Amino acid sequence: MCIYIGSRTKDPDPLKPEYKYMYQRRFLEAACVDVNKDSEEGISKKVSGMWSKFEEDLYCNNGQFDVQNGSILKYAAVSKFDAFIDDIIKWKINLNRVDPTDKRTILDYVKYQKEKNAGNALEPILQEYYELLRDAGAKHKSEL
């Protein structure tokens, strides 16, 4: 999955126009979603259920990612992949997992990255992610 996130790989034969990325196809297929029959609520339920089962395996290692075996959520944030962030929120993915490697949630990580990039062009993007994630129910480790 990390390769699809990092490269923003397009699906050569999208399931529907709104599903233009390969990560979407892979998650929807893994969750046994039928995009022509399942409602948005049904899709969210299936994808979040599948995610919960495999959450421990959804991590990335990449030279441009500063967390060894870090959550794919964090990798998407540091890669500035808006579509993925929007999808995980829409699919109601668990946003409060604490990674065993860096001991942070996605919200902790985005806050750390925002502070690290204070005053440069990344700060407003990371602030937007922080607010989106917070509004979607993401918490800091200290709040769990």
Image (cartoon, rainbow, N blue to C red):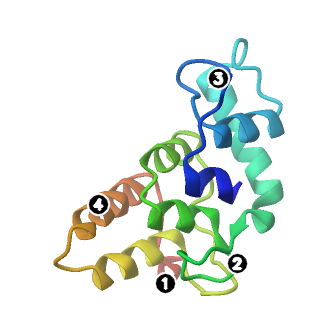
Is 142 left or right of 9, judged from the image as shown?
left
Measuring from the top left, give residue 21's x and y in whole percent.
Answer: 60, 36
Q: Amino acid at mark 1?
A: Ser
Secondary structure found at label 1:
helix
What residue is shown with label 3? 14
**Residue at 69% over, 45% down:** 48
Element under label 4?
helix
Residue 59, given in percent of the width and then of the height, sits at 70, 68
Other-residue count near label 4 (Cα within 10 Å), few / some / many at <14 / 14–19 / ≥20: some
Instruction: Check disc 2 and report the residue beneath it.
Output: 69
Residue at 52 percent of width and 80 percent of height = 141
Q: Secondary structure at mark 2?
A: loop
State the residue position of label 1.
142
Q: Position of residue 35 (x, y in %)?
A: 69, 19
Q: Residue at x 66, y 38 (%)?
A: 22
Instruction: Tell me the residue that label 4 is attached to.
Output: 125
Marks 2/3: CA–CA distance: 29 Å
- The vertical placement of 2 against 91, above or below, is below
Dot 2 or dot 3: first in sequence order is 3
Whole-percent x and y of residue 39?
64, 19
Distance from label 4 to label 3 (Cα)?
28 Å
First-in-chain label (1 vs 2): 2
Q: CA distance from mark 1 to mark 3?
A: 40 Å
Callout 2–callout 4 Cβ contact below 8 Å: no
Q: Is 53 drawn above or below residue 86 in the view shown?
A: below
- Whichever of callouts 1 and 3 sits on the residue coming sooner in the sequence is 3
The answer to which of marks 4 and 3 sits earlier in the sequence is 3
- The residue type indicated by label 3 comes to Pro
Of circles 1 and 3, which is in front? 3
Q: Are marks 2 and 3 in contact (CB under 8 Å)?
A: no
Label 2 is placed on what type of residue?
A: Asn
